[in-house]
Image (cartoon, rainbow, N blue to C red):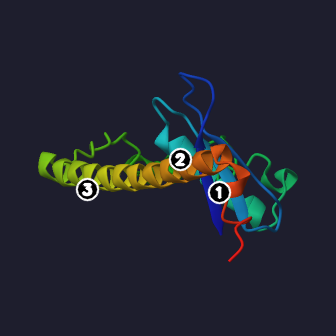
């Protein structure tokens, strides 16, 4: 089964909701972002699982297992134990020595590229110098017109 859990769009919303297709293996649960009602969420999950088993709303009418009626809060009291508290993300601080090693590696690569560029520039400067000389040379001194 594929279950997708997303936050509701409205800020301050306490209720959960969801949707699932009949006789399917997919459902989506919308969870309140700020202060989710854990018992309500447990009921919504059960309701959507009933849809995946093929149950329609008319079969769920006025039944506390599937709707928010009667003693559904006591049926889904186990929802209080759901771990839905926000957990702060740990910052991924990279140690300074690792950053130094990376910086030295990148500097070495840049210096290598610079050396290659200088060599290539010198090659093309020599090429330009050679053809400039050939272009200004009189035709009688050109090697192509010389008879052996």
Residue in view at x 21 percent, y 48 percent: 99
For marks 2 and 3 on the same chain, the one whose residue lies earlier in the sequence: 3
For marks 1 and 3 on the same chain, the one whose residue lies earlier in the sequence: 3
Establish if 35 lies above or below 86: above
Asked whether the beta carbons under mark 1 and mark 2 sit within 8 Å of each other, the answer is no
| Any part of residue 32 in sight | yes
Q: Which residue does the numbered mark 2 point to in the structure image?
A: 129
Establish if 71 lies above or below 119: above
- In the foreground, 107 or 11: 107
For the N terminus, the image quarter is bottom right
Q: Is residue 124 found left or right of 69 in the rendered image?
A: left
Per the rendering, the mark at residue 141 is 1
Q: Distance between the residues labelled 1 and 2?
A: 17 Å
Q: Distance between the residues labelled 1 and 3?
A: 52 Å
Q: How far apart are marks 2 and 3 (CA)?
A: 36 Å
Dot 1: few (<14), some (14–19), or many (≥20) neighbours within 10 Å? few
Residue in view at x 69 percent, y 46 percent: 18
**Residue 103 coordinates in the image, percent (x, y):** 24, 48
């Amino acid at each position: 089964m594929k279950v997708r859990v997303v936050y509701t769009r409205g800020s301050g919303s306490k209720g959960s909701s969801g949707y699932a297709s009949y006789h399917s293996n997919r459902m989506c649960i919308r969870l309140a972002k700020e202060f989710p009602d854990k018992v309500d969420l447990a009921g919504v999950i059960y309701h959507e699982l009933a849809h995946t088993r093929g149950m329609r709303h008319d079969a769920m009418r006025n039944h506390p297992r599937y709707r928010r009626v009667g003693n559904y809060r006591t049926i889904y009291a186990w929802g209080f134990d759901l771990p839905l508290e926000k957990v702060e993300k740990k910052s991924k601080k990279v140690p300074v020595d690792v950053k130094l090693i990376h910086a030295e590696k990148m500097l070495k690569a840049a210096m290598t590229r610079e050396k290659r560029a200088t060599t290539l520039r010198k090659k093309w400067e020599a090429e330009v110098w050679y053809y400039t000389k050939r272009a200004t040379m009189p035709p009688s001194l050109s090697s192509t017109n010389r008879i052996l």
